[in-house]
Image: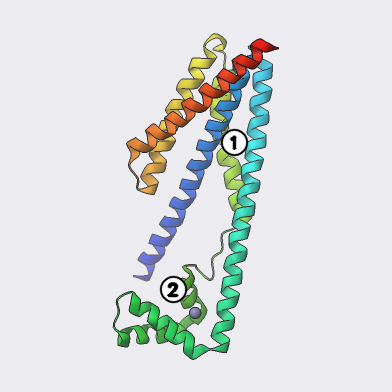
Amino acid sequence: MANQEFQRQSMAAKLNWLRAGVLGANDGIVSTAGLVMGVAGATTDSAAILIAGVAGLVAGSISMAGGEYTSVSAQKDSEKAALARERKELAQDPEGELRELAWFYEQKGLSLDLATKVAKELTEKDALKAHAEAELGIDSEQHASPGQAAIASFIAFAGGSLLPLLAVTGPWVEARIPVTVVAVVASLAITGYVGAKIGGAKSAAAIIRNVVVSLLTMGITYGIGLLVGTSI
Ligand SMILES: [Zn+2]
């Protein structure tokens, strides 16, 4: 049982990582596609398009990594603060904390007797861990790593960005706009599908939403690029 529970948790953790990776790649595809389409609307200069795309890839990846680092650090800090508070309460009022834990299991549907028994046994084993799980919904021993999260989102965003960048700068110069649109729509259908599957959502709606957002993004930036390009 313990082993199964461990496997279930590590599976959930893997899916979380995969989901974050898919979302990051999705962001990279959409934002870099919008950027290069905007530049391609204004100019046919391949070097300018390439430079803009590379700059967008690097800037977006760093920005995503920084944002992720900040948000995971904040989450880690607040988890640590909550654990410290819980540790203090356990030291000051062990009886009250035991009742609180038993009350929690009673709410979950156990009888008062059994809930008290469960709470006692868990408290003897590792009181802080039991309270962290029951009240805070966190694992007292495992904290997400801000550095790892930052690196993962950097890679995911950069990987996604590469796709529109390669599509728009490929040897098919005359067809760069349709090739990019098709490549972006096809890849976003895939990320939309995978993202929905992982999240347990309906995949058709997710794919349509994803594709429509990217078409809007590319259409708007391309239109702005055309306008700006003809007025300078
Ligand atoms: Zn507590």
Reading the chain from its start, which is encountered first: label 2 or label 1? 2
Query: What residue is drawn where x is 43% and y is 29%?
Result: 212
Judged from the image, the secondary structure of the residue bearing numbered disc 1 is helix
Is 228 displayed left or right of 13 in the figure?
Answer: right
Give coordinates of residue 5: x percent, y percent.
Answer: 38, 66
**In which quadrant will I find the N terminus?**
bottom left
Q: Position of residue 55 (x, y in %)?
A: 68, 30
In the rendered structure, are the residues bearing label 2 and label 1 in contact, judged by CB atoms less than 8 Å apart?
no
Q: Secondary structure at mark 2?
A: helix
Q: Is residue 37 visible?
A: no
| Disc 1 residue lies near ligand 1 with CB under 8 A | no
Residue 134: mark in rendering: 2
At label 1, the amino acid type is Ala
**What residue is shown with label 1?**
158
Q: Is residue 85 above or below residue 172?
A: below
Q: Amino acid at mark 2?
A: Ala
Residue 190's image quarter?
top left
**Which residue is at the front of the view, 98 or 124?**
98
Numbered circle sitting on residue 145: none
Is the CB–ligand 1 distance for label 2 below 8 Å? yes
Residue occupying image coordinates x 57% and y 73%: 83
Taking 112 as reference, is 23 above or below it? Answer: above
Task: Identify which residue is drawn at 46% across, 52% down.
Answer: 16
Q: Position of residue 124 (x, y in %)?
A: 46, 86
- Which is more foreground, mark 2 or mark 1? 2
Q: Residues within 10 Å of mark 1 (few under 14, many from 20)?
A: many
Foreground residue among 150 and 212: 212
Real-space CA distance between mark 2 and mark 1, rounded to the nearest whole angstrom: 38 Å
In this rendering, the answer to whether 55 lies above or below 144 is above
Query: As rendered, which of 187 and 202 lies closer to the eye?
Result: 202
Residue depicted at 60% across the width and 21% down the height = 38
